[in-house]
Amino acid sequence: MKKLHALSLLATCLLASATVTWGAETPTITISKSDKIAIAIGALSGADGPQVAKILQNDLAMSGYFNVGPAANAGFIVGGTSSGTSLAGSVTDRAGKTVLSKTFNGTARGKVHAYADEIIETLTGNKGIADSKVAFVATHTGHKEIYVADADGSNVRQLTSDGTISVGPKLSPDGTKLVYTGYKSGYADVYEIDLNSGARNRIIKFPGTNIGACYSPNGRELAVILSKDGNPELYTTSAGGGSPHRLTHTPGVESSPTWSPSGDEIIYSSDDHGGPQLYRISASGGTGRLLSTGHGYNTEPNWSPDGKRVAFTVREGGFTIAILDLGSGNSHTVGSGEGPAWGADSRHLIFAEGGALILLDAQTGQKTTLVSGLGKISEPTWSR
């Protein structure tokens, strides 16, 4: 559907402020007036109507595109009827014209997130992030275990209980599966978990270290670091872990692969020439090309879904998040933290900062704490 920016109402440009908590309840976000699309949450009938309204308001505000306020000032009114696992949503403009009418089915929260993302795409032309999953490592139990949550930081649940080291989680693009490196067998093997059924399988168990597994954009391949031939090198395999194809041949240590949106290339970190730097290589192999970042220590790259930027971790005293524009070659830092991961909108990043999972709007600089209170959090990942 065509963008409807012309119908948006512009208000005084002020900074947005947010207060967020994690847990079973929906985080609450309060946004002040700003230069955004004015939208109102109208009548939402059904037994869970008030909860649906609360989740919708949070999702739309978190997207960064909307000013959620009273109907009198709104260019668009959001309404609908929620019954069980079904939500019939309807959005009208100021003139009463219906610009969106669609039914969403799913869990109590899932149907609302899907509705929010449809509103975002209809009114802005951009993908939403509400109906996605995040995962991360946390030390709440005294061990490094994997946790998963909704993109707004709610519904946090512990995914692994191995009582050992579980690291390097990566969600599949559709958010239905997750791969990670676990030491349950005593060795660094790659496991895959089906998030719907809970089934877990060990899919990569070559002699040596098996780390850094990352799904391709179509979910049919993995990029992974294997030391089965002696040195930690970059390989690709099938999603099930079979038929490894070696891409790099260096004396250095490769790590942290991330795929281009097309699946044709991979960016990774390597210390082949001293401190770890970022390299770009064809997914079919060849020679890695050094990316100039302006920093001497670069790890944990993550390629944005629109293909334009890569976020990564820089160590300059402490750990800092940086963003490299692949077109211009310019890079800049956006604050302290590590392990950045882009959302589907190529606008928001999540990253770890001490004991918290942080959401950053890279366009406005606004930061929101999504999850805290689980010990040290690290290595976040985001479905798309």
Image (cartoon, grey):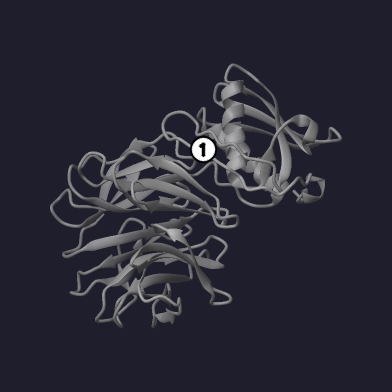
Looking at the rendered structure, the kind of residue marked 1 is: Thr
- What residue do we see at 50% from left, 31% from top? 26
Viewer-side residue, 77 vs 85? 77
Q: Is residue 245 above or below residue 188?
A: below
Residue at x 33%, y 67% (from the top left corner)? 317
Q: Quadrant of residue 194?
A: top left
Using the rendered view, name the quadrant where residue 51 is placed.
top right
Where residue 114 sits in the image (x, y, percent)? 58, 38
| Apparent side of residue 223 relative to residue 19 in the rendered image (left or right) | left
Please rate how many residues cluster around mark 1, counting C-alpha atoms within 10 Å: few if below 14, some from 14 to 19, many from 20. few
Q: Residue 337 placed where, x, y %?
A: 39, 57
On the image, the x and y values in percent for residue 372 come to: 37, 41
**Residue that badge 1 annotates:** 19
199 in relation to 234, above or below: above
Relative to 233, residue 33 above or below: above
- The answer to whether 176 is drawn above or below residue 86 in the figure is below
Q: Name the secondary structure under disc 1.
A: loop
Residue name at image x 67 percent, y 43 percent:
66
Question: Which residue is outermost to the top?
Answer: 47
